[in-house]
Amino acid sequence: MGTLRDLQFALQLKIEELRQRDTLIDELELELDAKDDLIRRLQGELDRYRATITPPETSGAIEGNSAQCEEIQRTRRKTILSKPLTQDPRQLALATLKSYNKSHQSQELIQTSFLENDFLKNLESGQILAIMDCMYPTTVNQGCCVIQEGDSGTLAYVLEEGKMEMTKDANKLLTIEPGKVFGELALLYSCTYTYTISALKNSMLWVIDRQSFQTIMVQSGLSRLAQFRELLCRVPFLRSLPEDVLMKVSDILEESRYSEGDYIIRQGATGDTFYIISSGQVKVTENKSANEEAVLLSTLSEGHWFGEKALRGEDVRTVNVIAAGDVTCLVVDRESFKKIIGLVEDSHNVHKSSELKGQSEEDAALLSNASLRDFQVICNLGEGETGHSELVQLKTNTNCPFTMRVLRKHQILSTAQQECILRERHILMAAHSPFIVRLHRTFRDAKCLYMLTEACLGGELWNLLKDRGSFDDSSTRFYTACVVEALIFLHHNSIAYRDLKPENVVLDQRGYAKVVGFGCAKKVGLGKKTWTFCGTPDYVAPEIILNKGHSVSADLWSLGVFVFELLSGSLPFCGPDPMKTFIATIRGIDLVEFPKTISKSASSLIKKLCRNNPAERLGNQRNGAKDIQKHKWFEGFNWEGLRKGTLSPPIIPKFISHLEDSKLDPFTDILEDSPAVEDSDWDIDF
């Protein structure tokens, strides 16, 4: 029998051996996680290549993704603005949906079809079950059409029995067999079908409509937000955080599930993870010595938390935490947490140019008593979906041109855009930024609404990009910086822009870029989300596509796409149709091959902006937009010179004086039927 010193030495050796084993276990777990990540990446890559393979039936009908993407980029891209189900999403939380009985075989078929669909497989399991529950049956006789080319629809289908054929311009594209989904794009917005689907046999289908789909998505999103917020507010050092920070923390939380006896935390191991129990119970034990059984210290249940020391950097676990039955925890790691929480700096460094202020006051004095009859048309600037734009000037001052947007009331009514137009006016009237087009006045008459804005005679950035093919780093940096300044102003005022693209960026006479096109803009409450599907397909963020609810952080994703397009002349996410584009977007930036025209530092910026999780995007963390401005791609850029207007733009627009060779047509020819009335509030009975 050894001495006490020998026993103590042996005990120390055993303890050290156990620590080494724990360290080895931790290393193996990290290696396993890395291999899991590799498997997911390879699976995503496999999905990507599968998506690019054209079925044999469609060869000859579809020429190829790259050629079609190039054709899309040469044409003006249309903004999608889906009408929301209700102005207050909270009303949807109380909505009830009718359920339809299904056999076990039908349930399995629908669920399998969803999981095999490139879009619907990204939904959560609870969402898939809820959608499946409210799908209703329908039958279609042989020869009848389910979808007609050129129509707009609101329904998606799963074929259970029979056979369908998809055609375009009377040419067969493919045959649809039982267990396949079709028409799913209509669940997102009112799209126009580009194909016809008809029954080759008497068929039976399950149907889901857009309203039910979006109701389920909003309900699940609101429920998740409420649950996560409630759990976060139970933690003392989190409950005092601002609403918007709480929302960001909830975005980075991940759900982890454990079974009876699983070690969630092991004593002596290193760790950087904080846990909140959302369901189930755990046992907290401590090993007093190597030869004694672990002592039970406590039992924790739903709403309790553990591992908070790891967020402060104290990463050696002092206790064991073991699952007592099935347990679900919300988990956040130290790195993600620190990017959002800490000494939050004032990232909303909003600048207002003194030059702009002086010019605005001068314009306000000039226009304060003006009516429509005081203007005359210089030339037409272009047509839009709800009207057109004219370059105009005051009859009494021919040295100061303006843009007059003429919006036809009947077109606004036919597209149900009343709320959208009023919201756009409200946002623009308050947007006093040198990087956002200035709205001076609004007018109306019996037929039209009028918006008088500053004239940006340098034209659209999109036209310049189309002519040049792409921009160099220096030019792209300048235009991106102008857009960043505009987004800083908007986000500081809780406004999500939601339609960033080169078509919506114009150059003024100096060559500075300004953001226009506020039809999708919306004020989103602090710590809140909105669910309206809107934007341009190539630019929309994944959370908009997946109906997860979005906030101002969706603009940061679009900013990354914007930089990519300016530098390369191509798009990172593109397909022969909107759904293929959306699927590429959901798969993410990591599967995108960057062209050589994009430098490493620019690639880094784009990848940090285009993160699938909004809370991980550069510009949406604790330092806000400063993280973008301090990124190495912007190293040496003169932000102060940009704000003051002293920085030389890369391109000085060339345009002929608006007075040269122009025939001045009086604006009053539009106003023959009724006198013009100025209405600053647009409180109009449409």
Image (cartoon, grey):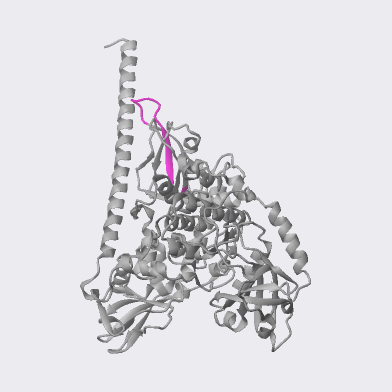
- Residue at the outermost front position: 661
Relative image position of residue 323 (x, y in whole percent): 39, 44
Q: Residue at 72% across / 60% down in the picture?
A: 360
Image quadrant where one finds the N terminus: top left
User: Can residue 670 be seen here?
Assistant: yes
In this picture, residue 666 sits left or right of residue 610: right
In this picture, residue 398 sits left or right of residue 321: right
Image quadrant where one finds the C terminus: bottom right
Relative image position of residue 441 (x, y in whole percent): 70, 70
Q: Residue at 44% across / 32% down in the picture?
A: 315
Q: Residue at 41% across / 83% down in the picture?
A: 151
- Residue range (magenta): 277-293
Relative image position of residue 337 (x, y in whole percent): 49, 43
* Between 298 and 348, the one nearer to me in the picture: 348
Question: Vertical placement of 483 versus 83: above or below?
Answer: above
* Between 293 and 36, the one nearer to me in the picture: 36
User: Can residue 164 be seen here?
Assistant: no
Question: Vertical placement of 662 versus 437: above or below?
Answer: below
Relative image position of residue 415 (x, y in whole percent): 54, 79
In this picture, residue 490 sits left or right of residue 103: right
